[in-house]
Image: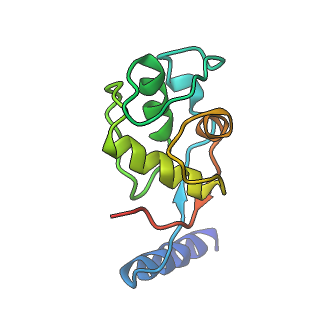
Amino acid sequence: MRRNRLLTTAAALGAAAALGLAVPHTAAAGTGGRCSYVSSDYRPTLTYGSTGAAVRQAQCLSNAWGGVPPKLAADGRYGDLTLKKVEWIQVCHGLPESGVIEGRTWEVLYHPALDCYARYPD
């Protein structure tokens, strides 16, 4: 029974994606332990153009998202791809789409929502 439900759900999600409908992107819970570029207590404000270990941490944490969003290289440079992903994560969590990583955005990077129905920007 459970297997049939999983197959039905997978088929429905595949059909929805093929039709261009929003399908959930999922995040792995508790990814902070795998990202160790800085202490989880160190949460500086980061903006487009920022560099360093805290940017690497944010990039690593953003990679908890499965599905369509691309994995970011933890290169420590806050550029176009990082900006696009951060803005999308902010939308998924109902935050202002500012691209600025600060208090609430750090919080959701460490504790992501399990599903997001917002379409990842092209």
Question: Which of the 4 image quarters holds residue 29?
Answer: top right
Q: Position of residue 14 (x, y in %)?
A: 42, 76
Residue 75 sits above or below residue 91 on the image? above
Residue 60 sits above or below residue 21 on the image? above
Q: 100 and 75: which one is in front?
A: 100
Q: Position of residue 43 (x, y in %)?
A: 61, 23
Q: What residue is shown at x 48% (from left), y 75% (from top)?
A: 13
Q: What residue is shown at x 43% (from left), y 48% (from top)?
A: 85
Q: What residue is shown at x 50% (from left), y 17% (from top)?
A: 36
**Image colouring:** rainbow
Count of picture labels: 0
Q: Position of residue 20 (x, y in %)?
A: 40, 80
Residue 8 sits above or below residue 24 on the image? below
Q: 102 and 28: which one is in front?
A: 102
Q: What residue is shown at x 47% (from left), y 80% (from top)?
A: 21
Q: 11 and 115: which one is in front?
A: 115
Q: Quadrant of the C terminus?
A: bottom left
Question: Which of the 4 image quarters holds residue 52?
Answer: top left
Q: Position of residue 55 (x, y in %)?
A: 44, 26
Left or right: residue 80 versus residue 31 is left
Q: Quadrant of the N terminus?
A: bottom right
